[in-house]
Image (tube, coloured by chain):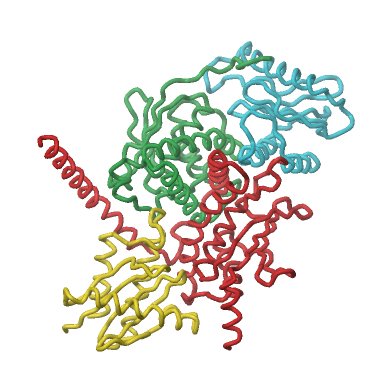
Chain colours: A red, B yellow, C green, D cyan
Amino acid sequence: MASQSQAQAQAQMHAQSLMKLDNKTSKRSNMLLEQNVSRPRRDRVGLGAFAFLFAEIIRYSQNRVLGIQDLEAKLNEIGQRVGVRMFELSMWREKTVHREMRVLQTLVFINTVVWRALFDKQADSLERSTENDDEYMITDNEPAVLKYISVPKEMSSFSPGAFISGIVEAIARCCQCPARVTSHVVPADGLPLRTVILLKFDKEVMDREKRLEAGK
Amino acid sequence: MSSTYYFAIVGTNDSPLYETELGVQRDESKYLNQFIVHAALDLVDDAQFMSTACYLKTVDRYNDWNVSAYVTPSNIRLMLLHEAKADDAIRLFFTDCHELYLKTLLNPFYEPNTPIQSQAFDVKVNTLAKKYLF
Amino acid sequence: MEKQYKAIGEEAWKNNAEKINAELFIFTYGSLVVQLVKDYENYSAVNKQLDKMGYNIGVRMVDDMMARTSLERCTGFSATAEVIAKVGFKLFLNVIPTVANWSADAKEFSLILDDNPLNDFCELPPKAVADGLRYSNVLCGVIRGALEMMQMQTEVEYVRDVLCGDDVSEIRVKLLRMLDEEVPASDD
Amino acid sequence: MIHALFIINRSGGLIYSKNFTQQVAQLSSNEALIFAGTFHGIHALASRISPAPKRDSVKDTGIQSIDTKNFRIHCYQTPTGIKFIAVTDLLQTKLSGALNKAYTLYCDYALKNPFYNLEMPIRSEMFDTKLHQLVQSH
């Protein structure tokens, strides 16, 4: 009996302390809900800060996975949380807040607005695959976030751009155009980290596109 | 002014992320409100491909109720049950609620499509309702 | 002295630092912390991991700061504090915390983070606050790692955190000892 | 003219060596290791025998260059204890600028690379390329 009431008292105390904390932190929630997000609050940080952080994210992830695919999946996951936020935020800052639901418009939005928001420039190209109708490629010749990374030969199939493909995958899903998104290093002359983000849209998306096209 | 509103935010998997009754509280109405909103989601799905606008205006009617909808770029549906028509006021209310949702989403600890539990959010929504709807 | 470091930091930021969108950095950091919370399911383990990752960053970052500035080895702990605040934080995060609360023996000081970019947008869940999650704990590790490369063994920790309801964020840096140098660790 | 470049880590280990001209002999890897370790030791001893006071502010930072009849060895030690060593002709009086640039490249393409392990030999094509460009442009 005694221990039970003790436990109850403890639980009550815990609840009280949580409430007290809640009062303290509600100031913070208020502040966050009141801040102006129509423009970025701050402009830049050092690329060095990002590069060191990203390197550490890769090292951390590497220690927790068995193979290259898992490593890419982990980076993809980390990128997705960035993508959802960056997308809704970039759209909010557009002149006309709107929705993109069509494959091509979504791709163009990613290629231009999102890329500018993330990397200060448009992606270098957006192409449709010549082999498969449901595949599109966004190419960045020199992704700033990968600038200093040299993938060792024994891991040559690893693409650190999996982080970027995670961002893109999340945005495609937000736009109701879910796709499998992968990243591939395709070096070109003087561009060792040229990265191709490959989107393969789900069948439902392509079917819907056809329906909407026919309905026009 | 005795108008009553029911406002809900619905996630991409059709689960409610937030709901509140604004104005006169009517106990028995909660489930009916949820039902009306849920039924209107299909109509939102149909309407949303007709334009790229977020605000879809009134998408459904049920007895005396109008159902207005606003869809955010990442397909989170803001739904409002209301009696009187007031397109512009509702647009402004929705737009500001969208901004509140956006700021909630920016928090790294908020997982998309999960219920919004912040008290501050609740207070702000009620303030917006007072500002635009009453 | 203080002015001089401020100028060095600003000069390096302006001319020698490549930059990146702050929000991309902030969201990426947030995503990492959330990942750690998922992976460890225990906030004090997350604190530890953030500190460790910060350490790994710090032992490397200090070289980047030195290479991009004209700094020499710091003379004394008070100059070190100034360099961390006015050059290190400036160069990487584009903010300058305040150095304050020196201990009488001049072996401890605080960095008051009036403006911490990592915190933008962040609100901790109540459970994380109650369990003492230090969201920006990576910074402690960075400082500790960087100072170790400069032969200073330190203890660095958050003593106050706005995300946990405190009025300001304060990181305490305590010098434990100077590590031996001059003699090469191994000659073979 | 920069003939060769070596990087020595904090404990005297050789982590990078590269010849840029045919004019200097290619040391065997064993010789290069000995060169690095020996230089590291002499560098430390030199700052010990220095008549300069041992206070931090005026402390001697060790050997900055060694001359022979035909060439010069330059050394730039970073505040963290890494040594960048270049072999040049005698016309090169001061090389700290170029060595500082090499230091920056080391920070970018070794330290910021997640696959580089601290204190270990640098194996990065990008580092090679950038360093080569630096030496060419010098």
Q: Quadrant of the N terminus of chain D?
A: top right
Instruction: Kindly give the residue lying farthest to the front in the view shown.
Output: A1
For residue D120, above or below residue C180: below
For the residue pair D87 and A117, the one nearer the viewer reads as A117
For residue A31, above or below residue C50: below
Please indicate, yes or no, whether residue A167 appears anywhere in the rendered image. Answer: yes
For the residue pair A124 and D86, the one nearer the viewer reads as A124
Q: Quadrant of the C terminus of chain D?
A: top right
Residue at (36% x, 74% y) in the render: B78
Residue at (47% x, 20% y) in the render: C178
Horizontal arrangement in the rendering, residue B98 relative to residue C60 (left or right): left
Horizontal arrangement in the rendering, residue B105 relative to residue A47 (left or right): left
Number of numbered discs:
0
* Res A108 quadrant in image: bottom right
Horizontal arrangement in the rendering, residue D43 relative to residue A202 (left or right): right
Q: Looking at the picture, how far across and down is residue B72, in whole percent? A: 43, 72
Q: Looking at the picture, how far across and down is residue D127, in whole percent? A: 72, 40
For residue A204, above or below residue C114: below
* Res A13 quadrant in image: top left
* Res D3 quadrant in image: top right
For the residue pair A166 and A113, the one nearer the viewer reads as A166
Instruction: Kindly give the residue lying farthest to the left in the view shown.
Output: A1
Q: Looking at the picture, how far across and down is residue D22, in whole percent? A: 89, 32
For residue A116, above or below residue C1: below
Please indicate, yes or no, whether residue B25 appears anywhere in the rendered image. Answer: no
Residue at (57% x, 53% y) in the render: A163
Q: Looking at the picture, how far across and down is residue C105, in whole percent? A: 35, 22
